[in-house]
Image: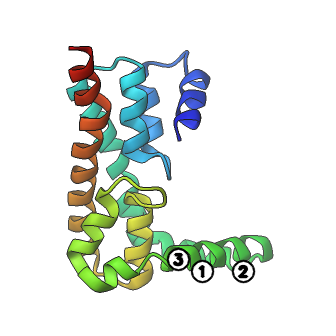
């Protein structure tokens, strides 16, 4: 992930660092986690970085929860896109154990613990595919993003600060 973040940071070097971290936070896979790493590399002050990254990570979630099933149904009408959507659905549904076992709290942990293949985007997709009510999943995902923000804040800002002294 660090190589992707460094590449994106270089590609968007001409842009304002705030815009760079916002764009990174909007992207699937990278999300807030990548945004905070990029913010740290770009020396963006912590509070500003946190606010920008959280907003960037939260913006796509309602759209995923509300529209992804309709978008997937439409894409399945096309051979190549349909195969990709089916693959993505199957890959996402393999991660359902935690949500099936722990419900609301499982979704929070799934979104909040920064591991590969987890996060707001995947959590919203999984919640939508599992038919979890939008209000319930929105709250769980928002709490999960806050948890991810706390963990990534420690990793990207607090630990380096403590090491530097």
From the image, tell me which residue sits under label 1. 73
Q: Position of residue 55 (x, y in %)?
A: 30, 43
> Between marks 2 and 1, how big is the CA–CA gap?
7 Å
- Residue 120's label in the rendered image is none
> Residue 40 appears at what percent x and percent y?
36, 25
Q: Assess whether mark 3 and mark 1 are in contact (beta carbons under 8 angstroms).
A: yes
Q: Residue at x 58, y 80 (%)?
A: 90
The circle drawn on residue 70 is: 3
Is any part of residue 94 visible from this angle? yes
* 29 relative to 102 in the view: left or right: right
Task: Give the secondary structure at mark 1.
Answer: helix
Observer-nearest of 9 and 23: 9
Q: Nearer the viewer, residue 66 or 139?
A: 139
Do the numbered discs 2 and 1 sit on residues whose CB atoms are within 8 Å? Answer: yes
127 sits left or right of 91 in the view: left
Disc 2 crowd, CA 10 A, few/some/many (<14, 14-19, 20+): few
Calculate the distance from the C-alpha at mark 1 to the C-alpha at mark 3.
Answer: 5 Å
Question: In x, y percent, where is residue 16?
Answer: 44, 18
Quadrant in which the C terminus is drawn: top left
Return the residue nearer the eye: 5 or 53.
5
Residue 62 in picture, x, y percent from top left? 35, 62
Q: Looking at the image, is mark 2 or mark 3 earlier in the sequence?
A: 3
* Residue of label 2: 77
């Amino acid at each position: 992930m660090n190589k992707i973040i460094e590449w994106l940071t270089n590609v968007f070097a001409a842009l304002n660092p705030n815009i760079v971290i916002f764009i990174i936070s909007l992207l699937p896979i990278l999300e807030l986690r990548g945004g905070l790493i990029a913010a740290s590399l770009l020396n963006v002050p912590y509070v500003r970085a946190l606010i920008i990254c959280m907003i960037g990570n939260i913006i796509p979630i309602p759209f995923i929860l509300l529209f992804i099933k309709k978008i997937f149904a439409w894409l399945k009408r096309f051979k190549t896109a349909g195969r990709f959507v089916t693959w993505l659905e199957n890959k996402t549904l393999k991660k359902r154990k935690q949500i099936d076992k722990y419900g609301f709290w499982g979704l929070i942990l799934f979104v909040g613990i920064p591991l590969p293949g987890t996060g707001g985007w995947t959590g919203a997709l999984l919640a939508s595919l599992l038919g979890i009510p939008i209000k319930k999943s929105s709250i769980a995902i928002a709490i999960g993003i806050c948890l991810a923000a706390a963990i990534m804040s420690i990793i990207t800002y607090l630990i380096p600060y403590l090491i530097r002294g």
